[in-house]
Amino acid sequence: MDGSSTLHWPAADFSRVPYRVFSDRAIEEDEQQRLFEGPHWNYLGLAIEVPNPGDFLVGYVGRREVVLNRNKDGSLTAFVNSCAHRGAQLVRRLRGNAQNHICAYHQWCYATTGELIGVPQQRGVKGMGGMPADFDKAACGLKTLRVETYKGLVFATFSPDVEPLGDYLGPKMRPEIDRIFDRKPRLLGYFRQRVPSNWKLYLENVKDPYHAGLLHLFHVTFGIYRPTMSGRVIVDVARGHSILRTADIDEKKSDVDSAYAGIDKYREGYRLQDPSLFHVKPDYDDKVTNMIMTIFPNLMLGQVANTFQTRHVRPKGVDAFELYWTYFAFEDDDATAVEGKLRQSNFVGPAGYISLEDGEAGRLVQAGIACRPDDASFVEMGGRGKIEDIASLSTEVAVRGFWKRYAEAIGGDVGGAAE
Amino acid sequence: MSAAAMSPDAHAIDPALAARVAELLGDYVAAIDDDTLEAWPELFVADGQYRILSRENVALGLPAPLVYYYSQGMLRDRVTALRTALTYQYVYTRHVTSPPRVRRRADGDLEVRSDFAIYQSTEEGVTTLYAVGRYDDVVTTHEGRLRFRRRDVILDTFGIPNNISVPL
């Protein structure tokens, strides 16, 4: 195929992104092999979703269905959801509890660890048929993945070589994960969106603080997020992760007036008849109003106002993805705190005042780039050249950081005029 | 969660009341499908509740709502935001609803259940099935008119086609 082998990155600093990466089916194949089944850790879920022995859930590694299991000894196993015999889908419910998994087709039976433990008619019937004498059950287990957890976040990889999860997450991301997951989460529910755009357009979106203060009137008008607040972008260039962090401190009214002069997204006169959804006591006293972390390749984890969630970006073909939200509170939250998080779900998710607009942004870009598929985007806000941390939200540097890491994983010819 | 069956002490109602319930449900659909959204909050009592819930979460006993408005003011705020603030795709909508199942509760309010399918049509006139689900309502009499005390929209289509902008 002519996927990434003919991909050309016009600028070495990734300030140009060829639109082909959002529409080319051959590149989609390369992503499955080199990203999701390559040397990277893929998010499967939270450990609290499979608390008891036998609990399982079906997740995704790229397009592959992978089943996460809690074993009898408390350990976790992940296996590809396909019988070792003739390939049938093995686990047929998204979630549940089972001491073993039996294939519906021929009743092959597997332990939660993926080991094959039963084959009907192995020795034949009435002395005839059956498996050959040298049939070895131990060699016919399910295809398993490496599984590791960090602070209750469960990841899996097909790669025998990738570094341990803690190192993969790295020293720049771990403190922000710890800030949230040092408390035990309590599951509140799931949201699912089928967004009509390539999955990477969502990664660009959540690495782009520039849009957040311009697309989202609610962010701006109600002070959840403004570029005039104290903010920074932290990029782990080697690993492809990033953090956008905003705290409501040191903001000057004169800066807001200047940044939004002539822009209709900051409306001093805009009032809610019932603003009680803003009257929620924050969990932390650090005044952080927005923290969006992305873990390469396709996990977002963060905080918007006083809501906390993971968002798993699941490719569903080249021009669609599922955004799978896992929305949680904390075990030490009292009833008032949980109620506050339910009220603030009105900001996020597919119907939320902020997040619904990100789905629309994805649709608009996918539709727009179809008009000029051989062109490239222009990503220079925050400057060209070196990709590094910046104490500003007026930047797209984390977007360039994503593409740099992506190109290293996928390939293509990198070069061009910019340094 | 409110996905439970109708109350065991519920009683059937007379045809005249059933017709008034049907009118309320029809007014609701008209407010959305005719794009007269300003009429939508007025169909609720002042402390009325409107939620959109994923059937997946309801089945799992998980409380996270897709939308959770607990006052008429919040409904009006949504309309204002749709009219003046939010960025979303303009589409025409069409509700197809089942006849309601109505029972009177011991406290006098009505429990009303109905099913819906909502189609969306683009500005180029291309129609897709957007959402399927169930309305689970509590209807009360306020100043001589029937009004929603609560409407829960329980979505079978919880894999939301992109996003939810106008009310369902």
Image (cartoon, coloured by chain):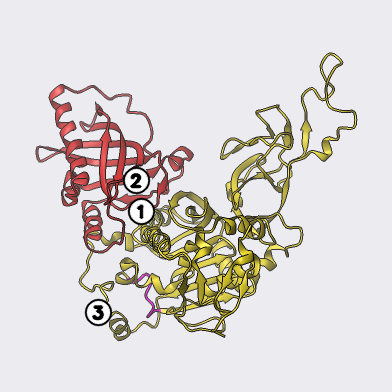
Chain colours: A yellow, B red
Name the residue beneath numbered marker 3: A262
Q: From the image, state whether disc 3 or disc 2 is nearer to you.
A: 3
Q: Residues within 10 Å of mark 3 (few under 14, many from 20)?
A: few
Residue B103 % position (x, y): 25, 26
Chain of the residue under the numbered disc 2 shown in the image: B
Which structural element holds mark 2?
strand
Q: Are marks 3 and 1 on the same chain?
A: yes
Res A90 quadrant in image: top right
Asked if the residues shown at circle 1 and circle 2 are in contact, with their CB atoms under 8 angstroms apart, the answer is yes
Q: CA distance from mark 1 to mark 2?
A: 9 Å
In-front residue for pair A388/A9? A9
Which structural element holds mark 1?
loop
Residue for point 57% across, 85% down: A419
Which structural element holds mark 3?
loop
Question: The residue under label 3 is which amino acid type?
Answer: Gly
Q: Which residues are magenta?
A: A223-229
Going by the image, does A345 lie left or right of A271?
Answer: right
Residue B52: which disc? 2
In which quadrant is the N terminus of chain B drawn?
top left
Of callouts 3 and 1, the N-terminal one: 3
Name the residue beneath numbered marker 1: A351
Question: The residue under label 1 is which amino acid type?
Answer: Ala
Q: Residues within 10 Å of mark 2 (few under 14, many from 20)?
A: many
